[in-house]
Image: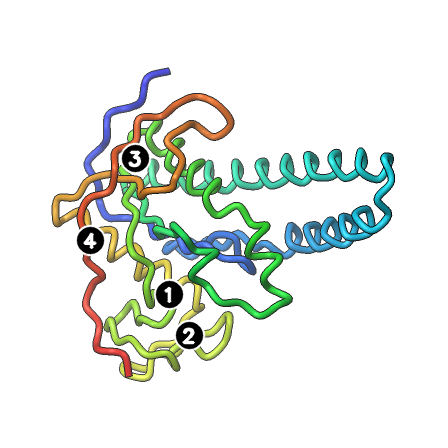
Amino acid sequence: MPDAAECETDGFVGVDLGIVNIATTSDGHIMAGRKLNRYRERQRRLRAKLHKKGTKSAKRLLKRQRRKESRRSRDANHVISKRIVAEAERTSRGIALEDLTGIRRRVRQRKPQRAALHSWSFRRLGDFIAYKAKRAGVPVVFVNPAYSSRECAECAYTHRHNRISQAAFTCRSCGVVAHADRNASRVLARRGQDTWDAGRQSSVPDGVARHRPDAEATRASRPGPDRKLGRSRPRS
């Protein structure tokens, strides 16, 4: 099936990716990851036991469990990406995604969170969204996510104390109170619009697969120059 022609956009849907909430859109849709994270934690403990056992049967079981976990992750990414692209297509908007190239090297996590960070398929979900969006003619832009969790979507004020917890965001400048991931996704949506307005059309960053998830090739362009981050005050 040929790719659809890119449509004119009426704004962007920002998508904030995470571990606790796999994906949160600027429309307020939250795809929680609690169930999948619990499953992965059980699988991690099982793998540790099988590695310790070290028998041939344990190694065979370990391979089967890895394939099973991979299938489950792929299915979850398929459902999430399909929902995001369908909403963007229905409302004639583009999709603004975080450029998470090198996220595992850049992000510092506490020890209990490291396994979740390294097991979560950031790149694959981005691949699914980009592929499905291209087939639907929905523009996709990848934006720099720096400080999006600290920036206010209402007034653009950026401060590390704006995000008071994993779920809560309170702007120290304008006083707006919001769900932290929803606020971040709205910041990404604005950055996506800024990037689009600057003339840098649908792009895929280095490191994101140039192929359809699990087989067929897609034709994605390389990224443009540094992306505009939107207005913000200097870090304090």
Tell me whether circle 2 and circle 1 mark residues in contact (CB < 8 Å). yes
In the figure, 131 relative to 159: above or below?
above
Secondary structure found at label 4: loop
Secondary structure found at label 3: loop
The residue at the point 27 percent across, 37 percent down is 139
Query: At label 3, which amino acid type do we have?
Result: Val
Query: At label 1, which amino acid type do we have?
Result: Asn
Horizontal relation, residue 183 to residue 189: left or right:
right
Q: Nearer the viewer, residue 61 or 220?
A: 61
Q: Nearer the viewer, residue 115 or 178?
A: 115
Cα separation between marks 4 and 2: 27 Å
Q: Which mark is residue 103?
A: none
Query: At label 4, which amino acid type do we have?
Result: Asp
Q: Position of residue 197 (x, y in %)?
A: 14, 49
Quarter of the figure that contains the C terminus: bottom left
Q: Which residue is mark 2?
A: 169
First of labels 2, 3 by sequence position: 3
Q: Which residue is mark 1?
A: 183
Mark 4 residue crowding within 10 angstroms, few (<14) / some (14–19) / many (20+): few
Residue extending farthest top: 1
Which quadrant of the view contains residue 4?
top left
Cα separation between marks 4 and 3: 22 Å
Q: Nearer the viewer, residue 124 or 80?
A: 124
Q: Which residue is mark 3?
A: 138
Tell me whether circle 1 and circle 3 mark residues in contact (CB < 8 Å). no
First of labels 4, 2 by sequence position: 2
